[in-house]
Amino acid sequence: MIDPGVITALIFNIVVCFGLPLGCILYLIIAKRRAFIPVLVGAAVFIVFQLIIRIPLLQYVLAPMGWYSDMAHQPWLYGIFLGFTAGLFEEGGRYLGYRTLLKKRTRWIDGFAFGVGHGGIEAITLVGFSNISSLVIAFMINNGQFSQLASYMPSDTAKQIASQLTSLQPLDVCLGGIERILAFAIQIALSLMVLMAVRERKLYIAGIAVITHMLVDAPIVILPEVFGANIYQIQMVLAIVAILALVFIILSRQAFKKTPVGTPVSTSVTSDNHS
C-alpha cells in the first residue's frame, strides 16, 4: 500500500507544477493582454534549447565519450560543466528569443511573462508529468490493479516501480513541488536579466546570467558529492537563491522604467514598452 500522505504530496506537486504557471498565465491574459506571446516564446525556448538540444546532446552524444565519462567522476568539474551548459543553452535561447521573436516587447512584464512560460513548461515537463504517472500507479497499487499494468512490463521493472513508490516519504515527495516554486522564481529573474541585456544592448549582462545559472545549478551536483549535503540542505541553498531572485524581480521594475542606456528613445523602447 502507498501511504496516503505520499498520494497527497504527489497531488500537491501536480497542483504546483500546473497551477502556478497557469495561474500566472491567467493573470497575464486578464491584466496584461499583450504579455501572452512572451509566455509562448519562453516555453518554446525551454523545449527547443533544453529538451530537444541540450539534454539529448548530453545523453546520446557526449555520454559515450571517454572524457565525459571520466568527468562524471569529478564532482567539481562535472557540476560546473552541467551548470555552465544549462546556462549557456537556456540564456542563449532566451537571448535569441528576445532578439528574433520579441523585438518590440521589452517591457518588464514581457520579461516576467517569458520567465513564466520558461519556468512553467520546465515544471510541467520535468516534474508534473512524472508525478501524474506516479499518482496513477499509486492508485492502482492501492486498488489492487497494478498487477494488470505489471503484466505489460518486465517483472524486475514492475517490482522496482512498486518498491520505489512504497518506500517514499511524504515530505521527501513534497520537496519536488517546493523546488519547482523556487526554480520558478529563479527562471523569471534570469529571463528579466537577459531582457535587460537585450534592452540596454549590453551583452555582458547576458554573460552574467549564464554564470548565475551555472552558480545555481552546479551546487546541486557538488554539494552532495563533495560535502555530503542532504536533499534538505540543498533545498535550503536553493531557497536562499530564490529569495535573492525575488528581490531582483521586484527591484528590476525600477530599472525597466528608465530609458535604456544606448537605446534611442525613438525605437521600440518607448513609454508603451514600460511596465
Image (tube, rainbow, N blue to C red):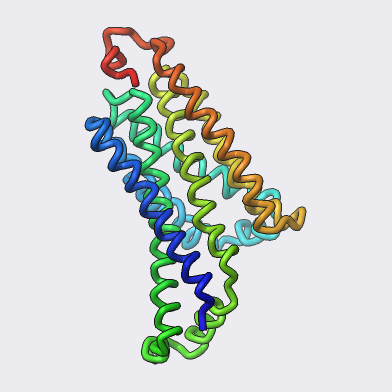
Residue 253 horizontal side relative to residue 218, left or right: left
The residue depicted at 63 percent of the width and 57 percent of the height is 67
x and y percentages locating residue 245 in the rendered image: 54, 34
The answer to which of 18 and 189 lies nearer the viewer is: 18
The quadrant of the rendering that contains the C terminus is top left
Q: Is residue 80 visible?
A: no
Report the side of 266 relative to 193 (left or right).
Answer: left
Residue 168, percent across and down?
58, 72
Q: Nearer the viewer, residue 163 or 6?
A: 6
**Picture quarter containing residue 101?**
top left
User: Up-down: is 165 above or below 52?
Assistant: below
Q: Is residue 219 visible?
A: yes
Q: Is residue 26 left or right of residue 46?
A: left
14 lies above or below 34: below
Residue in the image at 26% along x and 16% along y: 272
Q: Position of residue 65 (x, y in %)?
A: 57, 61
Instruction: Give how far across and how far down residue 260 sits, in percent.
Output: 40, 13
Q: Is residue 259 above or below residue 126?
A: above
Closest to the observer, 253 or 37 = 253
| Residue in the image at 44% along x and 58% along y | 126
Residue farthest toward the top in the current orientation of the protein: 265
Query: Which one is in front, 255 or 52?
Result: 255
Looking at the image, residue 110 lies above or below residue 170 = above
